[in-house]
Image (cartoon, rainbow, N blue to C red):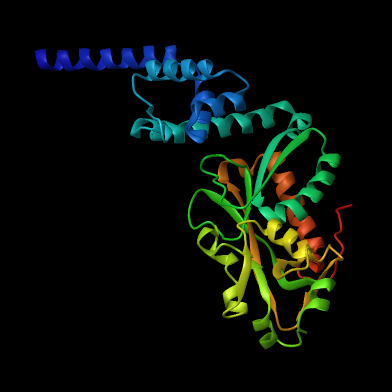
Amino acid sequence: MQTSNKNAHKSRSNMQKNITSLGSLNWDDLKFFLEVARTRKASIAAKRLAVDYTTVSRRISSLEVSLGTLLFEKSRTSGFVLTPEGQRLLGYAESIESTLHMACEQVSGSGVALSGHVRMGCTEGFGSFFVTPQLSHFVDTYPAISVDILPLPHFISLSKREADIVIALERPEHGPYVCCKLCDYTLQLYATQDYLDQHPPIQRPADLADHSFISYVDDLAFSSELLYLANVVPGASASLRSTSVIAQYVAAQQGRSLAILPCFLAAQDPRLLPILGEEITITRQFWMYCREDLRKLKRITLLWDYIREVTEQNQALLMGRTRHMVFAD
């Protein structure tokens, strides 16, 4: 009987301790926790939250005290690294964040539902030469929605919330994502008229052996989908290489080398001419995805549907059949 009483007393004591811990928890601290977990840098989190570094540090310490556990290991090289306890909290904190977003849309009315902020990550060329012009029209239609576009020559992480929506060359293999194939697009071989005038004629693929190319740095390419030159022109010599498709595009404009470029980029530039268009055409795909917990947000849905609409309207440009981009009505 004494053992039973002791166990009951211990259980009530633990429950009281949990209630006390929950009561001392500042829910706003979770916002700071999420930013530090995603950026691994208190200084970057401070900039995102528009506060100073000491505020971020104090909030994290306050949360750790409230929960009675260490959430981050601090490293000079790696920054703030989540502990196992921090990893477990991250999933719950992201669920709370998403639920709050949904709640705000549900109770605040349509005016708030069509406002807010969206961050879109995208491959560098598509983001700069197609998505950005299209988004300039989107924000005209929905001025209360602000959009960040991140056209970057590397992988963008949704798990770290570097973006809300991502357009990538490859479909994500796993994760809590909603994903769709956005579109096909083609790449062709391009050169300037000056280049063609000053170099041996190109009448068939075999003639390319006498020419120099601009291409990717193979061992630094962020996706195997970019390594097409060796397959298209075996033994091709690249006199200039870059991790950036925009750098390759600018170099091709100088009339010194040939370049394989996306049609949506090069076709809009009258200085670049397609070479052997019937023989050399590469088809690739873009995939669009976002986290499942964000997909139902109205601002995400609006942008998602808009991007799908304008890519459908621009299939001719994406597939190299026209030089002109069209915009949604």
Residue at 84% from the left image edge and 73% from the top image edge: 193
Identify which residue is drawn at 87% across, 66% down.
270
Q: Would residue 86 be found to the left or right of residue 97 on screen?
A: left
Most distant residue in the right direction:
329
Q: Is residue 321 visible?
A: no
Is residue 102 positioned above or below 170 on the image?
above
Q: Identify the image quadrant of residue 64.
A: top left
Left or right: residue 174 versus residue 99 is: left
Q: Position of residue 210 (x, y in %)?
A: 67, 82
Q: Quadrant of residue 188?
A: bottom right
Query: Residue 184, position in %: x, y?
Result: 69, 67
Residue 35 at what x, y percent from top left? 53, 30
Residue 148's place in the image compared with 269, above or below, is: above
Q: Nearer the viewer, residue 192 or 131?
A: 192
Which residue is pictured at 78% across the width and 68% down the height? 255
> Which percent across, then down, holds residue 119?
66, 40
Q: Quadrant of the N terminus?
A: top left
Instruction: Tell me if residue 53 can be seen.
Output: yes
